[in-house]
Image (tube, rainbow, N blue to C red):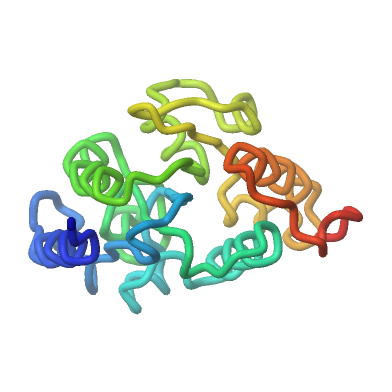
Amino acid sequence: MEDRDGMLQELKSQVAQCRRCRLAQTRSQTVFGEGSSVAEVMFIGEGPGYQEDRTGRPFVGPAGELLTRIIERGMGISRRQVYIANLVKCRPTVDMKMVRDRPPDPEEVQTCTPYLLRQIGIIRPRAIVALGSPSMKYLLKTSSGITKLRGTWGEFNGIPVMPTYHPSYVLRNGGEKSPLRRDVWEDIKMVLEKLGWPLPVLHSGGDR
């Protein structure tokens, strides 16, 4: 019987020692990913931020808190039941100064995504949620923006991919009262329907 947890742990150890790109020069630590090795849903963002770089865990800052609510309230499951990772495992910042975050550049994505591909191959999720434009563009091999493709199914290596807004984008554009939250909820409902999972009772009346 295959040991998915063991394979992920071995890969995590490899990532921790990685110095393949310049991001290794400024990171506090790598941010491998976390969740269930048999997760049916995988969330993929772009890269770690300040809090993630400090803790070594993905999505633990304000955007992570929103993502957790999306998972637990919107999907009716525990965060531990999904798997969360990023395109790159080290924090990308403007001018490498570790002050302002930025999306990973093409070279960083190309260098680091073999680790992500291995994670996907080990976990073999039934669906992937691409959080934001960088992860969507990588997974779907598209130049279109997130506003055009969110809410429409794509595919990566035979796995259905649902692009939606990154939680940090939602927070920057109205936060908890942002109309983008409704869009994200509609996208998540499509994921639940694809998996054949029930809608949480909390949201059956439209409450988010």
Query: Taking 105 as reference, is 20 above or below it?
Result: below
x, y percentage for residue 170?
66, 52
* Picture coordinates of residue 184, whole percent (x, y): 69, 46
Q: Residue reaching furthest right?
A: 205
Q: How many marks?
A: 0
Q: Residue at x 20, y 56 (%)?
A: 23
Residue in front for this viewpoint, 158 or 169: 158
The correct choice, above or below, for 60 with respect to 71 in the image is: below
Residue farthest to the front, as pictured:
1
Task: From the viewer's perspective, tell me whether residue 164 is left or right of residue 25.
Answer: right
**Which residue is painted at 82% across and 58% down in the image?**
203
Residue 194: give x, y in percent of width and height. 60, 37
Q: State the residue at coordinates (35%, 53%).
A: 94
Furthest-bottom residue in this view: 55
Between residue 72 and residue 170, name the one nearer to us: 72
Answer with the quarter of the image where residue 19 lies. bottom left
On-image quarter of the N terminus: bottom left
**Quadrant where the C terminus is found in the figure:** bottom right
Vertical order, 142 against 122 (above or below): above
**Left or right: 152 with respect to 2?**
right
Q: Relative to residue 20, is residue 80 drawn left or right?
A: right
- In the foreground, 188 or 196: 196
Residue at point 46% right, 65% down?
Answer: 59
* Relative image position of residue 129 (x, y in whole percent): 51, 44
